Amino acid sequence: MLKRRSFWVILVACLLVAGVAAAMLKKQNHAPVIPASQPAVTFMEFLPSDVTQVNEHELRQLLPLSGSLRAVNQASVKAKVPGEVREVLVREGEAVKTGQILIKMDVSDYQARVDQAKGALQAARGQLEIATKTRDNNKALLDKGFISKTAFDNAESQFDIARANVESAKGALDVAQKALADTIIRAPISGLVSSRTVQPGEKVSADNRLLDVVDLNQMEMEAAVPAGDIMHVALGQEVQVRVEGMPKPIAGKVVRINPATQAGSRSIMVYIQIDNPQGALRVGMFGEAQLTIAKKSGVLSVPQSAIQTEAGNTFVYAIENSKLVRKPVTLGMRGDDGDGAAVEIADGLSRGAQIVKTNLGSLRVGTTVKFAQAGNPAVTNSSKAAAQ
């Protein structure tokens, strides 16, 4: 009995061991295969547009300004006398010359006044002629003792009154003739008609605004400068003005500075003169100007985006012997080198050095650098991997 019980115990133990072994073998067969680790990236690819060479540039410190354009010479054509408008000879956009007839008004009333003034002058001259003869005759009689001194003085007073009446009639005729001439309205300056507010048949009063004429040969931009920056502005300073619709900046200069601040904004108006020989600029166009505060020529400069800062130290990433290196630099003036925001390199780089001009974050120094073709989708991924 004892031997039989031992036999069964041993049999059960063997079966348990076999089951455990089979389960472990099955688990090993279904375990995931761990792939071999990929090799680390050992180079970095750049696009040609990611790097630049250090060269000499003209560096300018700029003060941004903005404002609307207006013509330096412009004139409002107004009615000098009241009356009815008979003809308007020009329209908006037409070129006119100084003295050209623009508007004709009804002259009938003013011609009648001239005729009346001429008649009054003729009558006054007749009275003067009579008074002159009377005075001369009385003087001869006075010399012979036929009349008293009082009688002669009366004749001379009548002569003086007649002469004054002639002068007054002349003045009245001049006024009438001027009013008649003012019914013909002429261009005060040469330029283009920018607005017309009158039509034939309308009755206008004196000083009514009828037309506007602008001369586009000389334009200026009126720009507000903060009071804190006005000390940097001086007459004759160079300005580069970008005007909407114009492909290139236009050169200008500061010609006037307002002596008073503007109410509310406390800014000071500055007037920038711009040449417009082709007449491409128009009144009311919006311009953005870059006022040159300071200028340095022939200085080494790099894009502002290339400058890196760490723990108060400034540096750039450069490429030397196809390797990425870190170059500490000493900075000078900040400004614009014609291609955008730039910084002067006072020390740390030499002319022709190749640097990374785009801020790609912290890069791995010593990494081999390769250049890829633009549009290669693998460039971005490999660059990120090398920077990590």
Image (cartoon, helix red, strand yellow):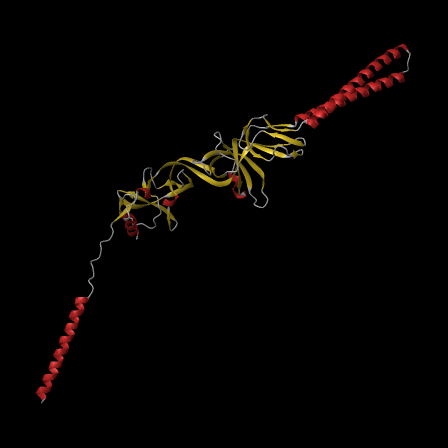
Indicate whether 232 appears above or below 186.
below
Q: Furthest-bottom residue in view?
A: 1
Q: Is residue 370 visible?
A: yes
Can you tell which quarter of the image residue 179 is in? top right
Res 171 visible: no
Judged left or right of residue 299, residue 133 is right
Question: Number of labelled discs?
Answer: 0
Residue lying at 87% horizontally and 19% vertically, measured from the top left: 154
Q: Indicate left or right for 91 with 371 as reference.
A: right
- Give the camera-side residue of 387 and 106: 106
The N terminus sits in image quarter: bottom left
Q: Quadrant of residue 190?
A: top right
Residue 176, position in %: x, y? Answer: 71, 25
* Residue 135 placement, left or right of 276: right
Q: Is residue 276 above or below residue 342?
A: above
Which residue is the extreme one toward the top?
144
Residue at (18%, 66%) from the top-left corner? Answer: 30
Q: Is residue 320 above or below residue 169?
A: below
Q: Which x, y percent locates residue 322?
A: 26, 43
Out of 131 and 358, give the one closest to the viewer.
131
Image quadrant in which you'd find residue 160? top right
Q: Residue 136, image x and y in percent?
A: 83, 13
Q: Where is residue 386 shown, x and y percent of the image?
A: 28, 51
Depth check: give the residue in front, 336 or 132: 132
